[in-house]
Image: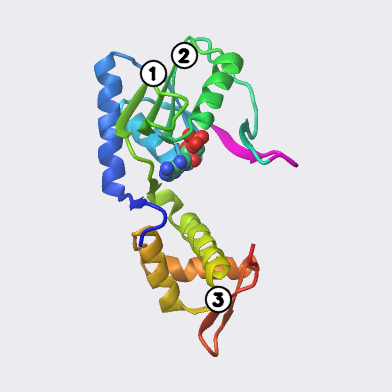
Amino acid sequence: MVRVRAKLVSWDEVVEWAWGLADRVRESGYKPDVIVALARGGYVPARLLCDFLDVENLLSIQSQHWTEAAKAEERAIIKFPYKVDLSNYRVLVVDDIVDTGDTLRLARDYIRDTWKPKELKTAALQWISPVAKFKPDYYYIEVKEWIWFQYPWTRLEDTYQFIKRMLQEKHKETGKTTWTLQEIINGFKEWYGIDVGEKYYKEALRILQEKQIIKQDPETKTITLIKTT
Ligand code: AMP
């Protein structure tokens, strides 16, 4: 049974969606002089939009969710704040997806107040309408039911985090601590409903070992969870 709904997004889909997003911007008559890629998810879509909208100027800013010490809630922050004068430019800030919307909204506010562009619009490939507190000016796909989009640029990171979550959860539910590679692969496919391929599973496990979350035994070919929470 699938526990977390996920969709594997292909490079071809990314190009198709970015093309569709560029169409929306073009149709509106907005002609940005500068595109701002929202790091890190917005990098690839922003670069494609530069091509599809014939924009030469590409900047970036990183906005990230940050867990405040001693507080359960998370808030978005601008990770490396800096200042540029964009008062003569029309700007389009681009991200991959608007989920809660905190990230893009914060970046939009920061750019508006600090870089002071002549005009500022926001764009994302996807917008999760039922949960987002913020609607971008342009989006290509309206997602009506929450799902995790496994983009090609976070494949490995998502894979090791997904495996970690699955093993810790399985441990909590059954007390089990040791698995074979095949059991983990089968479990992953069942939990997330996607298959990222053996190369990713193996590298993800190497990373989890490096982070001292699991331990791989080359002799018994088993994987043991060390960090259970
Ligand atoms: P947000 O909740 O809108 O602030 O999302 C922050 C960032 O997290 C997005 O720009 C994505 O890179 C990533 N993200 C959030 N939700 C999803 C999702 N459902 N699928 C894939 N990536 C996501």
Q: Position of residue 148 (x, y in %)?
A: 40, 47
Q: Position of residue 179 (x, y in %)?
A: 50, 78
Residue 66 forms part of the magenta stretch: yes
Region of the chain picked out in magenta, as a range:
61-71
Mark 2 and 1 residues: CB-CB less than 8 Å, in contact? Answer: yes
Q: Earlier in the sequence, mark 2 or mark 1?
A: 1
Q: Earlier in the sequence, mark 3 or mark 1?
A: 1
Q: Residues within 10 Å of mark 1 (few under 14, many from 20)?
A: many
**Front: mark 3 or 2:** 3
Amino acid type shown at disc 1:
Pro
Say which residue appears at 29% left-offset and 31% top-offset: 140
Q: Find disc 1 in the rendering and name its residue.
A: 32
Amino acid type shown at disc 3:
Lys
Q: Find disc 3 in the rendering and name its residue.
A: 176
CA distance for labels 3 and 2: 58 Å
Say which residue appears at 32% left-offset and 35% top-offset: 144
CA distance for labels 3 and 1: 55 Å
Q: Residues within 10 Å of mark 2 (few under 14, many from 20)?
A: some
Q: Position of residue 11 (x, y in %)?
A: 31, 49
For numbered disc 1, what is the local secondary structure?
Answer: loop
- On whether ligand 1 comes within 8 Å of the CB at mark 2, the answer is no
CA distance for labels 2 and 1: 8 Å
**Quarter-of-image position of residue 61:** top right
All told, the count of numbered labels is 3
